[in-house]
Amino acid sequence: MKPITLVLSTVLGVAVVAACGAGTFIYSGAYDIGADAPHSRPVYAALETLRRRSIQARASDITVPDLSDPQLILKGAGQYAAMCTACHLTPGQEDSEIRPGLYPRPPNLTQARIEPAQAFWTIKHGIKMSAMPAWGGSHDDMTIWSMVAFLRKLPGLSPEAYKAMVAAAPPDDDMDMDHPK
């Protein structure tokens, strides 16, 4: 047998054995997928890297519009209040009823600064196997950009300023699911 053929045969054999082992492990149900059972450190690190790099790669070509329009920010405040607070909290809020049961725990967006294109992509497309839905199926891009515009202001808001912005927000027509667009 030629050396290259031997190498290829060995690589193929190892790949088949590895695939069979992975298939057996997955099919056995041995891995606890429950949200109340954290991943091992290597699995968590791999999934976090996968999530972070996937979002960065897909958001890299997104052109961010001007997010400074006060009306756009106000619309985003209303959207955030209607759809995001149970998981991502409001200023001054320590926790919510749902957050302790979520794994991985969603970021507290009152304290996190997120790159706008990545926030847009995440809101529009969601994240598999998490509680983050894909809002792009029920909301247009400008509505999603309004949420991104608001997210840029959120970390600096006091609880009072947040409540005032939400109170001043326009009616949330996008949440009327009885009348699709």
Image: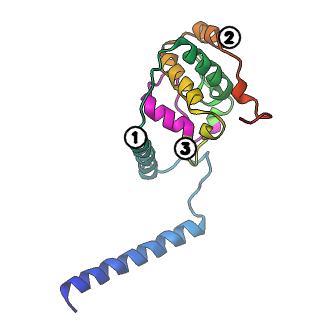
Does label 3 or label 2 sit earlier along the sequence? 3
CA distance separating discs 2 and 1: 34 Å
Which range of residues does the magenta coloring cover?
A: 101-124
CA distance separating discs 3 and 1: 13 Å
Circle 1 residues within 10 Å: few <14, some 14–19, many ≥20: some
Residue linked to disc 2: 167
- Quarter of the image that includes the C terminus: top right
Q: For residue 56, which numbered disc appears in the image?
A: 1
Which residue is at 45% across, 45% downward? 51
Could you say where residue 52 lies in the image, as x and y percent from the top left?
42, 42
Vertical order, 152 against 159 (above or below): below
Does label 3 or label 1 sit earlier along the sequence? 1
Could you say where residue 3 lies in the image, as x and y percent from the top left?
19, 85
Quadrant position of residue 172: top right
Residue furthest to the left: 3
* Of residues 39 and 128, the one drawn nearer to the viewer in this rendering: 128
Residue 104 seen in the figure = no
Q: Amino acid at mark 2?
A: Ala
Q: For residue 127, which numbered disc appears in the image?
A: 3
